Amino acid sequence: MTFQVGEKVGDYEIVGILGRGGMGKVFRVRNLLTNRLEAMKIVLPDTAASPEMADRFLREIRVHASLDHPHIAQLRTALRIENHVVMIIELVEGEGLDECLRQGIVDVLDGIRYVGQVLSALDYAHARGVIHRDIKPANIIVTQGTVKLTDFGIARAPGDRSFTRSGVALGSLYYMSPEQVRTEPIDGRSDLYSVGVTLYEIATGKRPFEGASDYSILSAHVSEMPVPPADLNSSLPSGLSEVILKALAKPPAERFQTAGEFRDALRQVSGFSRSEAALPPVPAPAGIDPSRLAPVESALVAALGPIARHLVARTAHKASGFDDLCRQLAEQIPDPKERKSFLRAVGGAAGGGAATTASTPAAPQVWDPSVLETARQALAVYVGPIAGVIVNQAAKTSRTKQELLEELASEIPSERDRRNFLARASG
C-alpha cells in the first residue's frame, strides 16, 4: 500500500495531505461509510520497520485514546490495514499556531487566550498522568477562535518509562525544558516551560533562545536567562512579562506547579481581564437575574475556556432556574477538581444553593452512540467543531430523539439550514 491521494485505505479514501513529521504522515481522508472528513496518521515506511518507532506509535494511540477534552484533537479510532496501524483523528480545520505567528496575525490578547486553552488541556492531561513532552506552536492548531492540542507522539503515559534513554533528549529543541535537555526525569512542569517558550514567542515575536548550533540552543535552555519580554515589547499587558519569566524558570520548583496555576496567573494579567469583561453580557431568560450569569460564565471559562460563553447562553434558556443552570453546566466539566472549584464559585453566586443542587446531577438518558454521532456530523456542517460539545450537552437533558434534534436545530440561525439539518439528522 502506497498511501497516495485517491487511494482507498479500508473504509477511507485519501483526499489530501495534511502534513509530515519525523515519524509519520498525516492525510485528509473521507470515511466512505459516513462521508465524514477526518485525519489519518500513519508511520512512514522508512521508520515502520523500526521496533522503537512502532512501539512509539502504539504508545501514541493508547495515550491519545485516554484523553477526551474540548482542546485536544480527538482520536476517533485506530485500526490495522494490511501491515499498517493507522490512527483516525478528528479533522481540525485551521492553521498551526507556528504559521499564524509567522504571518503576524496573532494579537497578544488572543494569544493569551490560546495559551489558556492549551493550559486547560494540559491540566486535564496531567491530572491523568499524561505528559505531552513536545509542546510547541506547530502542535497547537488554531480553528475558529479556539485551539486544539495535537501530536502526542512522544507523550508519556502513567507508569511508562520508554524513551528516556541516557543521551537522548526528546522534544523540539527551541521549546525543550532544561530537564529534558539534561535527559532527567520530568513531570508536568516540563510542559509548562514549553508553554512559557510559546507564550514568549507570542508576546515578542522571538523565541527566548536562538543560536548558531543545536548545542548553543540547548545550552541556553540550561544556563542562560532570557531577555525579559517587556524589554522587547513595551506594549505588553502589565504583568505578562513576569508570568512568562516565571514559566521559564530553570528549576522546576520555581515555575508554576500546575497548569491550572499558570492559567490563573494569566487571567490576572492586566488588559486580558478587561478584554473578557468587555464582551456583551449573556442574555438571560425570564426567571434568572442577568447579573448572576456573569460570575457563572467566569467560573466556567476557568474550566472549559471560551466555549463557556456559548454553554451558559444555551443552557440558561432551557434551565428551570439558577440552580438547575449550575447543575447542568457542572456536568460539562470533565475534571473532578475543576468541577468542584466551579461549584464552589457558583455556590457563592447562588447564596450557597447551587453548589448543593449541582453536586447531585440527574441520571442522563442512555443514547445509542450512532444517534449522537449522526447528529454531531449533521450539526458540524453549520456550527463547526463545537458541534460535539453541543450534542453531548443536549443529550443530557433531552428525552427523545425528536426532542434532541429540535434542541440542536435551535442552534442554527437560518430556517432553511434548520430544515436541512433535521432532514439529514433524522435519516
Image (cartoon, rainbow, N blue to C red):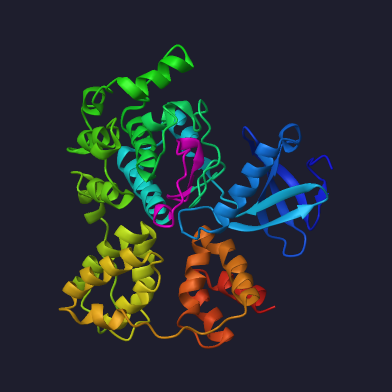
Above or below, 356 against 217 in this view is below
Please give left or right for residue 371 compared with residue 291 in the image.
Answer: right
The N terminus: image quadrant = top right
147 in magenta: yes
Q: Is residue 177 visible?
A: no
214 in magenta: no
Whole-percent x, y for residue 208 in the image: 34, 24
State which region is magenta: 125-148
Whole-percent x, y for residue 211 in the image: 41, 14
Whole-percent x, y for residue 215 in the image: 45, 16
Above or below, 292 against 99 in this view is below
Q: Nearer the viewer, residue 223 or 71?
A: 223
Q: Residue at horizontal 30%, vertical 42%? A: 109
Please give left or right for residue 273 compared with residue 94 in the image.
Answer: left
- Total label count? 0
Whole-percent x, y for residue 317 in the image: 35, 78
Above or below, 69 against 333 in this view is above
Q: Nearer the viewer, residue 254 or 241?
A: 254
The C terminus: image quadrant = bottom right
Q: Nearer the viewer, residue 265 or 52?
A: 52
Q: Nearer the viewer, residue 363 or 325?
A: 363
